[in-house]
Image (tube, coloured by chain):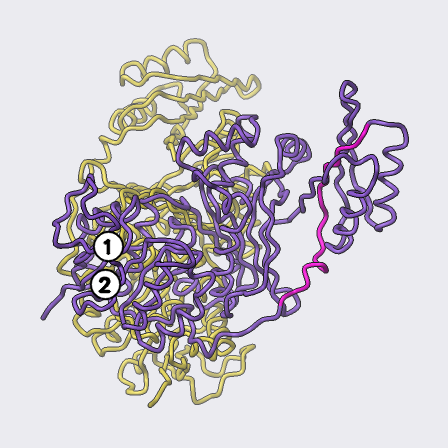
Chain colours: A purple, B yellow
Amino acid sequence: MNNYTNIALAGFGNIGGYFYKIINKNIKNIYLKTGNYPLIKYIAVKNINKKRKIKIPKKKYVKNPMSLVFKDDVDIIVELIGGAEGMAKKLVFEALKNKKHVITANKALISKYGDKLASIAEKNNVNLEYEASVAGGVPIIRSIKEGLIANKINKIYGILNGTTNYILSSMENKNKSFNDILNKAKQLGFAETNPESDLNGSDSADKLRILSSLAFNKFISKNKILTEGIQSINLTDIMYAKNLGYKIKLLSISEIKRNKLMERVHPCLISKNSYIAKIDGVLNAVVVDGLPIGKSVLQGEGAGPGPTSSALISDLCSILKNEINYPFGVSVKSRKKISSFNTLDHLCSSYLRIEVKDLPGVLSSITKIFAKNKISIKNLIQKPDKVKKIASIIIITHENSEKNFQNLLSHLNKNRYVLKNPTFIRIESV
Amino acid sequence: MNNYTNIALAGFGNIGGYFYKIINKNIKNIYLKTGNYPLIKYIAVKNINKKRKIKIPKKKYVKNPMSLVFKDDVDIIVELIGGAEGMAKKLVFEALKNKKHVITANKALISKYGDKLASIAEKNNVNLEYEASVAGGVPIIRSIKEGLIANKINKIYGILNGTTNYILSSMENKNKSFNDILNKAKQLGFAETNPESDLNGSDSADKLRILSSLAFNKFISKNKILTEGIQSINLTDIMYAKNLGYKIKLLSISEIKRNKLMERVHPCLISKNSYIAKIDGVLNAVVVDGLPIGKSVLQGEGAGPGPTSSALISDLCSILKNEINYPFGVSVKSRKKISSFNTLDHLCSSYLRIEVKDLPGVLSSITKIFAKNKISIKNLIQKPDKVKKIASIIIITHENSEKNFQNLLSHLNKNRYVLKNPTFIRIESV
């Protein structure tokens, strides 16, 4: 009886190299836990002759990842190329069509094509595993599918992006500007050279789409979800928030409201005593609120070779144990479509920072706009800068609808005293 | 094809009743996720004629739990009787011998007979599942076996007992005595009428034995492990700890030190800024420290019908999916024996409260004992009660060995000024 399962790696950067080493180091342990030895048979790399730290037998290298799909001695393809389109997409689609199991860390791909890929995997009775695509050091996908399987989940939320969490918590702790901390994060490897998808919230939104399709047994949202990043948040906001008893965090929140789905990613003011407020630095955390379990929390490092490899190997072990599961927990035909909750009806209180000319009559003009939009003010701080003849007006509002807030912002933008787009941050009770 | 799997419940109290309701409410969802309908066919109860809130068809009742073992139309037995001996033990052993899958919430049984039971289950190719035996709302057992499967775990620790955590955090938050809070906890149902096994740490020790056998792929410890409860902690200790920047928590800690295993359950002073310090009330939390993942944390409610049912059903779904796993993650023959680390060699700093007669020369006599035992003092507070002519001496020591601390305590006990056994709490950096 052959107890070897053959694996092909596509992509051999930081993560791939680490994964290769960990697999080889733990081969016996993995056999003891699964009954199968994982054997990395092929590695697809762009440049075979590139000098590498790890010594790999030449015969393992292939140049074209697509060739892996047709090899009889490949059982599992691990896709570490990345990106929702191009080679990664082509490889994963073709691999599943050719009855290869697939393991991927590619959140963009799963978020965009997960439903189609799941159909093919299910039809061909192979696994499509993607634990590493969301919060590597937090086994959240397997927990929803296994440990929390019994629960009717009402809400799933948390911090899904380590880069932005590092930036926000470091701005507060080190009292430094957004740009200073961003540069520091790039030096430390906590932010990529082009960190746009982290900063603008789209990385978090991809991950949230995946989590909410699992949590609510539904297809992945195709609609544009409310996504705002952290680029407009400055140190002033963080310090005002702190003085008012809040922290600013980029949260990803998915919940069922009146049988409809609301998914959103945006900065939030949250009570500094809340659990989520204490998740600092590059950590990720996910809170699952369900019945009968109540609140269950998972926390760990979000990214990096270690946590990502841990997630990839948990996927691998699931395949080695012959546990063929529906990629999204239930079969494609049992997954639901849920219509979207109209975000404009969402209620919250909020924080605004409005930069204005420091002239008589400003405050009356600004507060009149609030009154017109039926938004009542809970707390107002005016801070003039006499030299520049400008002032910052910080306002905490009472609860109101997103619709009214959007109208308010549009009216504020048109006001002749207002110098630039106000900063608007929703207050979330978590 | 018959897609029904027949279940028998043994024990029908709070948990059993809730489990029954949740199963019936979620039967379709469970089918969608597992491909099998769970059918509760029999319920073993002591008194068939007892009035119950839930209406159960009479034909489901049986009087003798042991009869379930021999029924051909029983696939899974859910044991909710409790206790390491007696009926629970007999039922689970016989069920596995008769090739029935077993699900149990019984930590005392698993902690004592888990190794033997796992052998039988493995031989007979049936499941022995016990997620609910440790921290119901925290899917820690399945996470070690699935989501964190790739990791070499070095240390696993946390708060495994909700009753004691509720008592300690309420004493601090409400500034009330141990007995006041214990009575309140009994009223609220957070403490049992006889809470001894919670208070003296043995409940936590049972759970820790189970976790460390899973985390380190070893047999369950048979040795007596260092177990101390919270009975000797009073409000004074909590308040002094608070002033010094600490919280007192009953921690369960298992770690590999120099290739040997150290398991211990005792109250600890931990930094009030640490993650674990923030787990208050009846919550449980488990920290897994492993490679390559780093620190992964799971947190949730420890007990109660909801969290326990969530855990029981995750076990059930695993069986319904035909995932027959080794009960402890690896086969019996692959599990190791690890020798115990000599607890007397453990190093830590510590907190002591010594009640003495308030007489001249006391402090010199007490500090001499510290010097003789080579334990150096970092911090000392003396608080006299002039009326009663007694004084409390609070001492924080530098790091030293358990052996020296034990000698110190024995010498202190013999000292003529010392009025009662000093309170000794280890300081743990977590």
Amino acid beneath label 1: Ala
B141 relative to B256 in the view: left or right = right
Residue A291 appears in the picture as rendered? no
Query: Alpha carbon of mark 1 to alpha carbon of mark 2: how far?
Result: 8 Å
Q: Which residue is mark 2?
A: A68
Magenta-colored span: A340-357
* Percent coordinates x, y for residue A194 in the rendering: 46, 41
Q: Which residue is mark 1?
A: A44
* Percent coordinates x, y for residue B80 in the rendering: 39, 69
Q: Secondary structure at mark 1?
A: strand
Q: Is residue A220 above or below residue A385?
A: below
Q: Is residue B64 above or below residue A144?
A: below
Residue B308 appears in the picture as rendered? yes
Q: Residues within 10 Å of mark 1 (few under 14, many from 20)?
A: many
Q: Residue at x 45, y 79 (%)?
A: B47
User: Looking at this view, is A105 or B50 the one in front?
Assistant: A105
State the mark number for residue B41: none
Q: Secondary structure at mark 2?
A: helix
Q: Chain of mark 1?
A: A
B265 relative to B181 in the view: left or right = left
Q: Quadrant where the N terminus of chain A lies?
A: bottom left
- Tell me, yes or no, whether the highlighted magenta stretch contains residue A350: yes
User: Looking at this view, is B194 or B37 the one in front?
Assistant: B37
Q: Residue at x 23, y 78 (%)?
A: B99
Amino acid beneath label 2: Leu
Residue found at the very far left of the displayed protein: A1
User: Looking at this view, is A47 or B252 the one in front?
Assistant: A47
* Percent coordinates x, y for residue A56 in the rendering: 15, 47
Q: Residue at x 63, y 39 (%)?
A: A232
